[in-house]
Image (tube, rainbow, N blue to C red):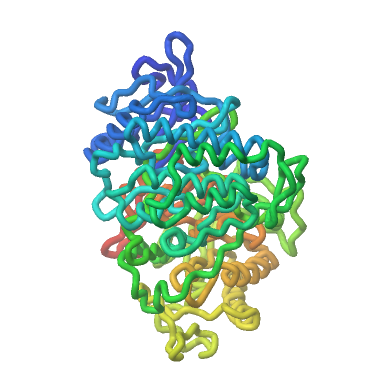
Amino acid sequence: MSLSPGNSESIGDYELIDRLGSGGMGVVYLGRSASGRQVAVKVVHAQYAQDQEFRTRFKQEVAAARLVSGAFTAPVVDADPDAEQPWMATLYVSGRTLSDVVAEDGPLRGRELRVLALGLVEALRDIHRAGVVHRDLKPSNVLMAEDGPRVIDFGVSHAVDNQALTVTGRLIGTPPFMSPEQFATPREVTPASDVFSLGSLLAYAATGNRPFDAASPYLTGWRVIHEAPVLDGVAEPLRSIAERCLAKDPATRPGLAELHRQLRTLPDSAGPVAPGVAGSGETGTSRRVSPARPAPPGLVTAAGEGATDRTRRGRGRRGRYILVGLAAALTVTGLSITAVKSGSHQNNTSPSPTAPVSTPAPTSTPAPTSPHASASASAPAPAATVTLPPKHVRWDYQIGGAYPPPTGVQVVSRSYEDAPAPGLYNICNLNAFQAQEGAEGDWNPDLLLRDANGAVVYDKDWNEAVLDIRTDAKRQRIAAEVNSWIDECAAKGYKAVEPDNYDTFTRFPEYLDADQAKAFMKLLSAHAHGKGLAIAQKNTLALMPYRASVGLDFAVVEECGEWDECGEFAEAFDNNVLVVEYSAKGLSGVCSDWSSTLSIIRRDQDVVPKGTSGYLRQTC
């Protein structure tokens, strides 16, 4: 990844050679000192450099990282947290992240796994001896160097004798690898919290699966706090060791000295593949499939009881539903941005390694204005030619009402009830998983989702009845109606469709699940492709790894800059991503990192037509 136009060629005494990766709050560069030593330089984004809270957090990271030194960490060599644009340089470590290794080569076995486990225990020993709790031990924060693992990124760590710095109402961490106490009592975490994270990380390294995996962060948090870990495929003796690390009570987890003794008993040879891990012992490859488990009953009711925080921006209905007690615990820090790739540091933006291998999407051709899009050579031929939207162009989001597109716009998304904009690439937005407000009477009563008392289940944020996609027969009947709208889109001259509310199942987990959503979307995808229309995935990060098997061609994503998710969508859809932001912060973040790659727009939250009170439209 090259330096972006406008980037400084040096910082401090270091020449910046390459831009290696970025996160929501900063960028990582490959730097070189006057003597030729290579370093990884983390720089806080300019827009956050004036934010006192972020400056304080960055100082905390520098201080914590400076305290720690050892063979299994990347030491700080220089820093200036008080600079106008704060920065820190650490020793450059060549190697892939553990997450990349598992995703690309399969789970670790034999000596590889033993070296990793012992190296991580020794790294935590050095970290804890310095009086620091890491708090974000996860696969993307472990570098697999030739001489052993390195633990990196102290962006959310804190000294054990200091009060944890948190944003008001939020806690920082990565849910699949957080301890129960990080959710429940975040200011009271101890070194035992890192031991819990180590147990999750080692299980992941051994199987490619996360012990508390779920379709959304809040369900993951629930499982961390209340459920036993799923350790299928973790062979003994590691399974018993991981179980002790993953004890809910911090006091019952083993200490590092005891762990080191136990982990030395891990075999050096690979041995047979453990149950639940299919693959070849010779190549180390395996099937990394971990379907989401059903949600525990009663988490969120039809009316949303149990949720303490709902952030819903824009008519695109992007929902954030957080359980009681978890709302404060599911925000991942924007400063955890150390980026690593093979031989260098990069963002860990690849799809979850637990996703199943998926089949290619239908062959599609790019619009003439796009020099970047390419067709899949191995994909089966569709019933009609599908044209993808051009990449990295000006676009407009008009689903709340059509108006003449601004000069230079090449792509427009509009409601299927409106006519497409002449001469442009038009995307037809339709509400596929819920009935429009007041339109539930247009549906057969048995196709509306109902609670145990027979009452219709509503998405109360939008007063929309939820459609019942739980059985194949009902999915077929609902799809017949939605596909008739897709036919209207094709007849009007639209080039693509954008089925909204793909993520409805995350808001009503006691009724719906991810497999039902995917099965229904497959019906829409097949019909759209048959009509020569491309089809977009709307939001729904949890189902992104399945995009090819479902048949989704590109993405329309709300607030990926706000939530630091743009990288995941960009990689999954080969940068064919149209971004909608609803805040100045979100626009600033996505423009800083993705203005040269993705199509970006900021709209008002109600997406009203131009000339209407409240109308807002901005670009990078």
Q: Is residue 269 above or below residue 436?
A: above
Q: Is residue 572 visible?
A: no
Horizontal side of residue 548 vs 344, given as left or right? right
Tell me which residue sits at (66%, 70%) in the image: 527
Q: Residue furthest left?
A: 52
Q: Is residue 440 above or below residue 58?
A: below
Q: Is residue 170 visible?
A: yes
Q: Is residue 474 above or below residue 23?
A: below
The answer to which of 312 and 295 lies nearer the viewer is 295
**Residue 193 placed where, x, y %?**
39, 47
Horizontal side of residue 610 vs 566, given as left or right? left
Q: Quadrant of residue 94?
A: top right
**Residue 15 placed where, x, y %?**
43, 17
Q: Quadrant of residue 342?
A: top right
Q: Is residue 311 above or below residue 106?
A: below
The answer to which of 378 and 323 lies nearer the viewer is 323
Horizontal side of residue 248 vs 553, given as left or right? left
How many labels, in total?
A: 0
**Residue 105 placed where, x, y %?**
67, 41
**Residue 66 placed where, x, y %?**
34, 26
Tell me which residue sits at (29%, 34%) in the image: 60
The answer to which of 476 and 509 lies nearer the viewer is 509
Q: Quadrant of residue 555?
A: bottom right
Q: Residue furthest top?
A: 35
Tell me which residue sits at (31%, 62%) in the image: 611
Task: Pick the quarter of the image with the C terminus.
Answer: top left
The answer to which of 49 and 574 lies nearer the viewer is 49
Horizontal side of residue 559 vs 104, given as left or right? left
